[in-house]
Image (spheres, rainbow, N blue to C red):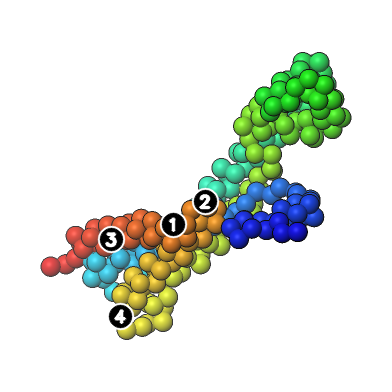
Amino acid sequence: MHYVGMNDEHGHSPQEISKRLSKGQRPGHLKDMIYGGIDGAVTTFAIVAGIEGAGLSHVNIVALGVANIIADGFSMAASNYSGTKAKFDERKRIIKIEERHIALHPEGELEGLRQILLMRGLSGAVLEEATTAIAQSKDNWIGLMLTDEYGLANVEPEPMRAALTTFAAFIVAGSVPLVPFVLRLEHAFAISVFATLMTFFLIGTGKSFWSLSKGWHSGSVTLLIGGVAALLTYIVGGLFHPA
Ligand SMILES: [Zn+2]
């Protein structure tokens, strides 16, 4: 039997489905990677373009670029950590609250569960049976409240992983504009511009895995945004160019 069509994103046989579901849900970190990567490439390239535009020595580029990667990368990672930690805490807090409600007002919470399932399309005897069955497991019960009552994803956010992913992506993408200067290549600035634009394109292509948009489209959009940011800093740097 053929379950996988040409354009399907994953298999649909019972075995494939069961394997996929048994892995459990984990928060994805592609978004953390993309934000860190774009910001790393933009801010480091801004320094490169600013210094080049102002006609300053290339020695400054490497020193300031590396300082940016460490400082700005850390700051990006730290703010991603606190943002993700806030989500983590909110989820924990809601679980505690609803555990207390279930202990104090079991009838009311059971009715809440019943109405959630009603909105999901169950009715009659099936609705009553499903309500009773799901209420057997407090995890399943509260899990449904998280998604259907609070609009949260039923996955535990991972603040540390999110932060480390952002930092790593920032360092990798942020290093690209500097490499031609570290290697003291001829035409270092032109190579840096080209490599940075390619980095934007690659990040944009990676973004398409998460947004399901077409790779080249997503790549071109990110290339355009990064290119404009880079051009702006080059122009601003040029304002300070000694005549
Ligand atoms: Zn409640």
Mark 1 or 4, which is nearer the eye?
1
Q: How many marks?
A: 4
Dot 1 alpha-carbon crowd within 10 angstroms: few under 14, some 14 to 19, many 20 or more: many
Tell me if I can see residue 133 in this picture.
Answer: yes
Q: Amino acid at mark 2?
A: Ser
SS at badge 1: helix
Query: Which amino acid is tagged 1?
Result: Ser
User: Label 2, on which residue?
Assistant: 211
Q: CA distance from mark 2 to mark 1?
A: 9 Å
The residue that label 4 is drawn on is 187
Residue closest to the eye, 102 or 167:
102
The label nearer to you, 4 versus 2, is: 2
Compare marks 3 and 1 and give the one earlier in the sequence. 1
Which amino acid type is shown beneath numbered disc 4? Answer: His
The residue where tag 3 is placed is 231
Identify the residue under disc 1: 218
Residue 194 image position (x, y, % from top left): 35, 72
* Quadrant of image for the C terminus: bottom left
Q: CA distance from mark 4 to mark 3?
A: 18 Å
> Tags 2 and 1 in contact by the CB under 8 Å rule?
yes
Image quadrant where one finds the N terminus: bottom right
Residue 222 is drawn in which quadrant?
bottom left
Residue 200 locus on image (x, y percent): 42, 63
* Among the two numbered marks 4 and 3 on one chain, the one whose residue lies closer to the N terminus: 4
Local SS, label 4: loop
Name the N-terminal-most of marks 2 and 1.
2
